[in-house]
Image: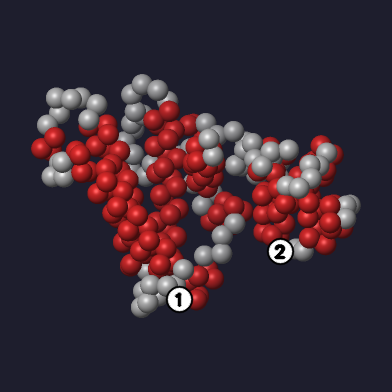
Amino acid sequence: MNADFPRILSLLRKERGISQKEAASELGISQALLSHYEKGIRECGLDFVVRAADYYHVSCDYLLGRSPERTGATLSVEDLPEAENAEKGNRLRGSILPTLNKKLIFHSLNILFDLLQRLNCTELTRSVSDFLMLSVYRMFRVVYSVNHKNDQNFFHVPPHLSTSRAIAAMVETEADAMAVADGSAGNKIISAEAREELALTSESLAQTYPQYTSSLLNLIKNSEHKMNR
């Protein structure tokens, strides 16, 4: 069994708000065995995978981490809506991959900034925005450097300093964002009501953002795959 199965099995139970004892009873196994499955200590058989998928109303592919979609659907570029205000025929030249990835990123940012708007916290929005702009800046410099004839005076920070300074600034802005998010940033407070409103699950995201959640889930899956390589 892969490493995703225990995590997803536990997540689905917690999303439903039930105890291990209750879930184990419904699934026809002991609480101790379910605990072992959720911790990855023991592997289950195919019959349990099917039973758990039916119980949580998800596909086996989702339960096994093969698809970020609860239905097990495979995402294609045609499945994703166009960006807002996109011009007709704006598909990027060449491979379909840039078009797909652009949509994944754009749609995920739609969700991210809508959540920030709901929180109504200027400091957190500023830190998140600064981090994302620095990320785009770094990658634009990489692409810009493909042609060695491109004038480096296009940028104020010289090439030999740009990466280290950008990384330092990203670490600082991420730390600022985390301090606000976890409540340790002094007077930069997110209200208890706003925190409660931001209780998120893959199911609640799909209900709130039906057009964009597939993109976010695939972006998360692709990112964590790269992180675990």
Where residue 94 appears, as percent x and y from the top left, is 36, 21
Q: Which residue appears at 27% of the width and 43% of the height?
A: 163
The residue labelled by disc 1 is: 191
The residue labelled by disc 2 is: 17
Disc ID at residue 181: none
Question: Distance of mark 2 from mark 1, alpha carbons?
Answer: 24 Å
Residue 87 seen in render: yes
Dot 2 amino acid type: Gly
Q: Is residue 227 left or right of residue 127?
A: right
Q: Is residue 97 left or right of residue 67?
A: left
User: The residue tagged with tag 2: helix, strand or loop?
Assistant: loop
Residue 128 falls in image quadrant = bottom left
Dot 1 amino acid type: Ser
Q: Which residue appears at 49% of the width and 31% of the height?
A: 78
Count residues near mark 1 (Cα–Cα under 10 Å), then give few for <14, some for 14-19, many for 20+.
Answer: few
Q: Is residue 180 left or right of residue 46?
A: left
Count residues near mark 2 (Cα–Cα under 10 Å), then give few for <14, some for 14-19, many for 20+.
Answer: few
In the rendered image, the vertical position of residue 199 relative to residue 143, given as above or below: below
Report the front residue among 128 and 217: 128
